[in-house]
Image: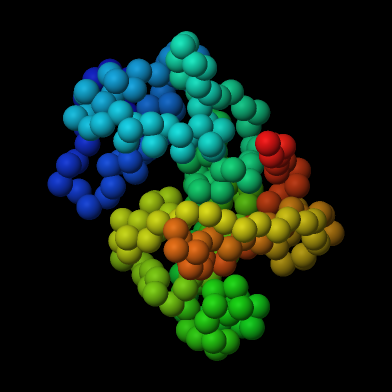
Amino acid sequence: MPENEIKNLKIDHKSKLPLHVQVEELLRQLISLPKYKSGAFLPKEVELANRLGISRNTIRQATNKLEHEGLLIRKKGIGTTVAIHSPLQTSLNNWYSFTHEMKSRGVNVINLDLKLEKVKANARIANFLNIAAGTEIVKLSKLKGLENDPIVYFESYFHPRIDLNYEDDLDKPLYQLLEEKYSILADRSSEHINAITDAGIAKKLKVPSKSPILFRERVVYDPGNRPIEYNLGYYRSDKFTYSIEIKKEG
């Protein structure tokens, strides 16, 4: 979105996509502009609400999401700015979209390889997705990186109610696609992280066969706590830091 088009932000009120999701996408585009990445304050909530013809609560719902992801910093009585991060750092709070997060840090990752297939769920996958072992499900594999420089390899296994195919826009952020096509909202994830060595994965990531790889196992749930996706992520340890922020309760 060119900077001179900021005043032309629009919401499609006839779209089935929830308003707050549309606002979230507009804000992601907005904060990628050089003006805001350089520290300029974002338009105020009331200004955005008036411009888009929606409530301030809808604007706040979207900005809360981006603030929770660590993309925005809000200072009471001052304004909202884009958070400044070191490149190639990811966070447990930012699981929603790897592509969006990297773009916010000035790193435009692309799909170097993509494969969609039907597989039989093994016992482990079946357990996480709460289905019978041997059930046919969709598997989506993505190798992401910069040109010929791979960064991360993902394998996603979906609950049988999600039947992705090559007619879908698989370059689109995954959870946005699920929400638009299946009205399935990713609400939370459960994560397990450890370091591994795997010669096959190392070959995909173009690192020595015995190099340590950051392995992340994730299950994503909808608001009804039903499993959506079982996801495996393999990150190059020389390219990534996985950050965790913990806040003391009370």
Query: In the rendered view, would you say 15 is above or below 137?
Result: above
Which of 51/105 is in front? 51
The C terminus, quarter of image: top right
Report the number of numbered marks: 0
Query: In the rendered view, would you say 100 is above or below 47?
Result: below
Expressed as whole percent of the image width and height from the top left, the position of residue 115 reads 49, 67
The N terminus, quarter of image: top left
* Residue pictured at 73% horizontal, 56% vertical: 193
Expressed as whole percent of the image width and height from the top left, the position of residue 36 reads 44, 19
Residue 196, image quadrant: bottom right
Horizontal relation, residue 96 to residue 183: left or right: right
Which of 11/235 is in front? 11
Query: In the rendered view, would you say 59 is above or below 218?
Result: above
Which of 67/35 is in front? 67
| Outermost front residue | 250
Expressed as whole percent of the image width and height from the top left, the position of residue 192 reads 70, 58
* Residue pictured at 47% horizontal, 11% vertical: 78
* Residue pictured at 46% horizontal, 11% vertical: 77
Q: Indicate the colouring scheme.
A: rainbow
Residue 91, image quadrant: top right
Expressed as whole percent of the image width and height from the top left, the position of residue 147 reads 55, 44
- Examine the rendering and report whether any part of residue 6 can be seen: no
* Residue pictured at 17% horizontal, 42% vertical: 13
| Outermost left residue | 14
- Examine the rendering and report whether any part of residue 85 can be seen: yes
Query: In the rendered view, would you say 158 is above or below 28?
Result: below
| Outermost right residue | 210
